[in-house]
Amino acid sequence: MDENLHIALIQSQLYWENPVANRISFSEKLTQITSAIDLIVLPEMFTTGFTMQPQNIDEDEGLKTLQWMQDLAKEKNAALAGSLVFQENDNFFNRLFFVFPNGTYCTYDKKHTFTLAGEHEVYQSGIEKLMLEYKGFKICPLICYDLRFPVWARNTEDYDVLLYVANWPKPRVNAWDALLKARAIENMSYCIGVNRIGIDGLGHEYVGHSAVYNVLGEQVAYSEKEEIVYARLSKGHIEKTRNKLKFLNDRDAFNWQ
């Protein structure tokens, strides 16, 4: 088994509340990926932008996008991850799908809904972390505002990769940069953050800063423009660093009894 995980982060503008246009746009972008890639990551709510009016989105668009992800995962022979507006049992979720190359998938519902924008009043909050295994790497995918809550992300499960998809706006992008690096260092894992760029339908500006940090908090990939960002994650780097610096042995178990 290859001890490396080759990833592609799609940093893109988004069409406001327009799943069809966004699927077409991302399909075109993914044709640019010609090398062997294991995992392709899209931003938060990549078919709509960060909308607080999910009722504007047809109920069947979530399933259409899931099918689109499954088709592309099979075509590219790569896993595909990103979150979208998803309606289920008359409730709305900001739901991340991690679709494997064979079309099977795992889901994670955003735990920390963004109260500043009223997300908690519109979307149901998730209650469970997701841990998944892919090509020898244990991955924990989270969504945007989750980044501000280190206890939720704490590496008590010995994961290798912490993955955030986001619509993180320009005024607070310094926090995005600092927290991604901090999550990598404190959890001794790779930390990946995939953000969007451009102006959304509410006038909020996004400047990207999609990035990958290694176990030591060193930046190994970064971008501020519309492009595909490539990176290679090394299982050897994780194991070598953790064996030398056994900081995770002293982590808190969060058992207060």
Image (cartoon, helix red, strand yellow):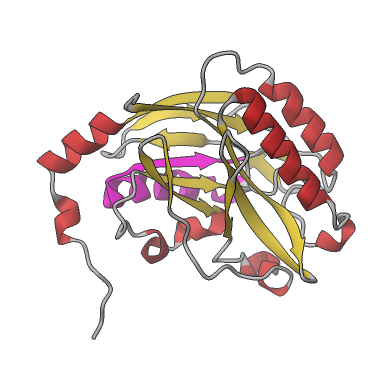
Residue 123 in the image: above or below residue 249: below
Q: Residue furthest bottom?
A: 257
Quadrant housing residue 181: top left
Instruction: Read off the magenta span.
Output: 170-195
Q: Residue furthest left?
A: 244
Quadrant location of the N terminus in the rendered image: top left
How far across and down, in percent of the image, does residue 252 sit?
22, 67
Left or right, 152 with respect to 46, comes to: left
Is 188 magenta? The answer is yes
Q: Residue furthest top?
A: 34
Nearer to the camera, 168 or 166: 166
Q: Residue at x 47, y 62 (%)?
A: 129
Left or right, 99 with respect to 13, comes to: left
Residue 229 in the image: above or below residue 168: above
Residue 233 in the image: above or below residue 187: above
Q: Residue at x 56, y 29 (%)?
A: 78
Q: Residue at x 37, y 65 (%)?
A: 151
Q: Is residue 32 visible?
A: yes
Left or right, 221 with respect to 64, comes to: left
Quadrant location of the C terminus in the rendered image: bottom left
How far across and down, in percent of the image, does residue 164 sit?
51, 47
How far across and down, in percent of the image, does residue 167 sit?
63, 48
Quadrant housing residue 115: bottom right
| Main secondary structure along the magenta-highlighted residues | helix
Is 54 magenta? The answer is no
How far across and down, in percent of the image, does residue 92 sit?
74, 65
Residue 220 in the image: above or below residue 104: above
Nearer to the camera, 91 or 203: 91
